Image (cartoon, rainbow, N blue to C red):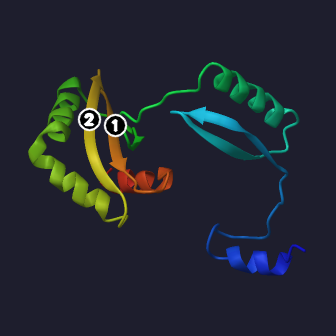
Amino acid sequence: HFDVAQFYNSIYGKNCENVIGFVPLPVGVVGPLVVNGESFMVPMATTEGALVASTSRGAKAIREAGGAACEVVADGMSRSPVVVLPSLRDAAALKAWIEDPTNFEELAACFGETTSHGKLKTARATVAGRYVYIRFTAHTGDAMGMNMVGKGVNQIM
């Protein structure tokens, strides 16, 4: 028996803002999916017909081909605001300031004002005319961190 009230009370104020309820979704399972020699059963919550079956066929093809191999070559979440400046000279100066290692500590401290978990790893800039495309990359711990990085970058900007 699924205790609806107990479940609602367990998520209220914890897992979502402005909770008004929850929606039970069908959950299927795909697998085994073989990655780096290890088999995984993958739960999928969806209402899209045939998605689990289609994904299962893909997992079977990967398994029969010997499995998938993967490596983590970089770990970070990034945000890339664009700044428009009055001139190319101003844009180049901003790029130089952002990429000057002596300024990174100031950027990281500003970013850190918004989170106790996220840590700014890099800040790089690309100039295209008067436009400066700034890519901030942060370590987000165990979180996916999209909102965490967005708040930190907004604080910097």
* The label number, if any, that marks residue 111 in the structure image: none
| Residue 101, horizontal then vertical, whole percent | 12, 43
Q: Secondary structure at mark 1?
A: strand
Q: Is residue 152 above or below residue 122?
A: below
Splitting the image into 4 quarters, where does residue 135 fall? top left
Q: Residues within 10 Å of mark 2 (few under 14, many from 20)?
A: some
Lower sequence index among marks 2 and 1: 2
Q: Is residue 155 above or below residue 78?
A: below
Query: Looking at numbered disc 2 in the image, what kind of residue is underneath it?
Result: Arg
* The label number, if any, that marks residue 135 in the structure image: 1
- Residue pictured at 85% horizontal, 51% vertical: 26
- Residue pictured at 88% horizontal, 36% vertical: 49
| Residue 134, horizontal then vertical, whole percent | 32, 36
- Residues tagged 2 and 1 counted as in contact (Cβ below 8 A): yes
Report how far apart the C-alphas of labels 2 and 1 lie in the structure: 5 Å
- Residue pictured at 84% horizontal, 60% vertical: 24
* The label number, if any, that marks residue 124 in the structure image: 2
| Residue 105, horizontal then vertical, whole percent | 16, 54
Splitting the image into 4 quarters, where does residue 1 fall? bottom right
